[in-house]
Image: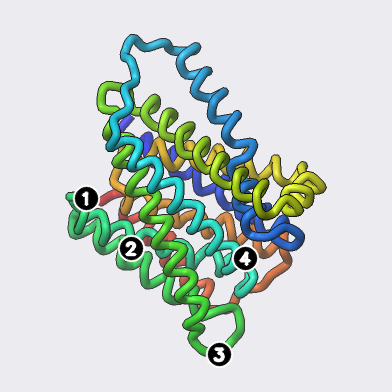
Amino acid sequence: MMFSWVLFTLMAAFTQAWRNAFQKQLSSTVDSFGVTLSRFIFAFPLALIYLWWLYTAKPISEIVFFTSTYWIYIVLAACAQIFATMLMIRLFHQKNYAIGVGLAKSEAILAAILGVTFFGEYLSPIAWCGVMLGAFAIYLLSKGGIQNSKFSWNTFIIGILSGLFFAITLLFVREATLQLDNLPTIYRAAWVLVCVIGLQSILLLLYLMSFKRNTIVKMCERKGLVLAISFTSCLASLGWFTAMSMQTAAIVTTLGQIEMIFSLFISAFFFKEKLVRTDHWGLFWIVIAAIIVIWA
């Protein structure tokens, strides 16, 4: 379907909003390495089950073939997402929930710039308007949750770096899916999902078992929350990766800023946090930007 990428993006945005909320809860007792691992530890077997279900429900004759270039993209995407997540967790401790997520959504403008510059992607003038409007919304959100507060360079820099690594992740994910051009789109995304999450789980588990075993103990004490994070993370990644195999990263991430609407409700009703006028305007312009890129 022509707008399948829209549905997958909306699914990703909704589940990611909840995943981030659960991560914020876990970060009160578990360090950033443990919170990051919680995204992948149970998501990996779930991704394997999803891949098995795809081939069982609708078998295909095409054989998957992984090139060395494919694995380079997988490794770069996996590492970039780990760094992005750890930076976002730091951001949660500096601003309230919705603002932290908002700053990390700078990935849209960064994905547009990097995609056009280094990956040969094309954006129409209308699409650029949507992306730039989204960037303006991010600026409003970066002003913080206190009336008349000064511009926070520390928060802004961490948010931009988190968004940069998220943008790099999605660009490499898209390039990895394009390497599997003999497979149907949804199968490409499923293989990339399994490979990226699997590698991330191995890397973080090895690190924590070697240097931070106490973190694993703390994760076990809150295994219900860890499972919730992994489940929502798997669904979110499935949505992002599939949408990314159908549409350019900049367009998908700009529409994905609709996540801020879900985050706003979670922030207000789940964490009992308040937003000021600039935050409301930022969220409003994010919605307008998302509408623009859908019709670009």
The numbered dot on residue 97 is 4
Q: Earlier in the sequence, mark 1 or mark 3?
A: 1
- Circle 1 residue: 119
Where in the figure is residue 121, as x and y percent of width and height? 20, 49
Which amino acid does the dot numbered 3 rest on? Asn
User: How busy is the neighbourhood of tag 3: few (under 14 within 10 Å), some, or many (20 plus)?
Assistant: few
Q: Quadrant of residue 245?
A: top left
Q: Earlier in the sequence, mark 2 or mark 3?
A: 2
Q: Earlier in the sequence, mark 4 or mark 3?
A: 4
Marks 4 and 3 sit apart, C-alpha to C-alpha, by 19 Å
- Circle 2 residue: 109
Mark 2 residue element? helix
Where in the figure is residue 164, as x and y percent of width and height? 39, 62
Mark nearest the camera among 4 and 1 is: 1
Quadrant holding the N terminus:
top left
Q: Earlier in the sequence, mark 1 or mark 2?
A: 2
